[in-house]
Image: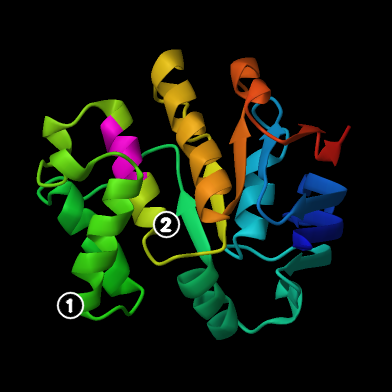
């Protein structure tokens, strides 16, 4: 299978001179394809900065990041956008759903933004919502869904375009621990059954039992 992610010497500095903040200081990270990996660390440890760099939402100040054999640090902005649209799924702590759209419409909307045709997007959206166990609830709007169900819609939106890599930043932070565990259990199933590679940030020790690898971040360094 090889490696989905290879990061070497990744450094990210915000600001300049005396006020410069070193969010990451030479991080090395390898994520094998088809694995569920957790980045853990306290707030301010650099987890979100690293997820943003892996997701090509930001560029490192120094170092190299390869996704599925492509050195993303050498890509133009346009190429990075294309990579995100086709190969990467992103899930955030807040579900960021459009409130007046049903679950199905939210997932379809995400697909349209990725350039998928309307006819194909309906089919892909229904498949993704079935995969996350929401087949019967897909026509409900966010306010009619529980927090766990809303996060499942967000997961469906992230996987609907069939990415190879899913990055999730604190996906269970807004959920009670039982619901949070069910979301990580869903990640586990997607890794096993769909061959996805998933990297998630968390500071919840209960999640560590379910993942394949844990990287601990402290003050911008993997310890």
Looking at the image, which residue is at 54% across and 53% down? 166
86 vs 220, left or right, is: left
Give yes or no for contact between labels 1 and 2 (Cβ–Cβ under 8 Å): no
183 vs 58, left or right, is: left
At mark 1, the secondary structure is: helix
Q: In which quarter of the image is the C terminus?
A: top right
Our reading of the magenta stretch's main secondary structure is helix
**The disc label shown at residue 130, or none:** none
Q: Name the residue under label 1.
A: 119
Q: What stretch is highlighted in magenta?
A: 149-154
Q: Where is residue 19 in the image (x, y as percent from the top left)?
A: 77, 46
Tell me which numbered mark, 1 or 2, is placed earlier along the sequence. 1
Q: Position of residue 211 (x, y in %)?
A: 66, 32
| Residue 18 is at least partly visible in this image | no
Q: Mark 2 points at which residue?
A: 159
Q: Where is residue 78 in the image (x, y as percent from the top left)?
A: 54, 84
């Amino acid at each position: 299978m090889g490696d989905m992610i290879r990061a070497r010497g990744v450094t990210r500095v915000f600001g300049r001179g005396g006020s410069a903040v070193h969010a990451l200081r030479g991080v090395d990270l390898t994520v094998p394809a088809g694995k569920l990996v957790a980045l853990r660390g306290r707030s301010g440890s650099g987890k979100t900065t690293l997820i943003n760099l892996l997701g090509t939402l930001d560029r490192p100040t120094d170092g190299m990041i390869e996704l599925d054999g492509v050195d993303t640090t050498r890509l133009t902005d346009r190429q990075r956008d294309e990579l995100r649209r086709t190969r990467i799924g992103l899930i955030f702590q807040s579900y960021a759903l459009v409130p007046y759209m049903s679950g199905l419409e939210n997932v379809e909307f995400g697909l349209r933004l990725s350039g998928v045709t309307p006819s194909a997007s309906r089919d892909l959206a229904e498949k993704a919502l079935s995969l996350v166990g929401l087949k019967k609830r897909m026509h409900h709007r966010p306010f009619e869904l529980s927090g766990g169900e809303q996060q499942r819609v967000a997961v469906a939106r992230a996987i609907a375009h069939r990415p190879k890599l899913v990055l999730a930043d604190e996906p269970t932070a807004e959920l009670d621990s039982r619901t949070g565990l069910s979301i990580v259990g869903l990640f586990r199933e997607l890794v096993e059954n769909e061959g996805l590679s998933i990297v998630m940030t968390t500071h919840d020790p209960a999640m560590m039992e379910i993942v394949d690898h844990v990287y601990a971040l402290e003050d911008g360094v993997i310890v």
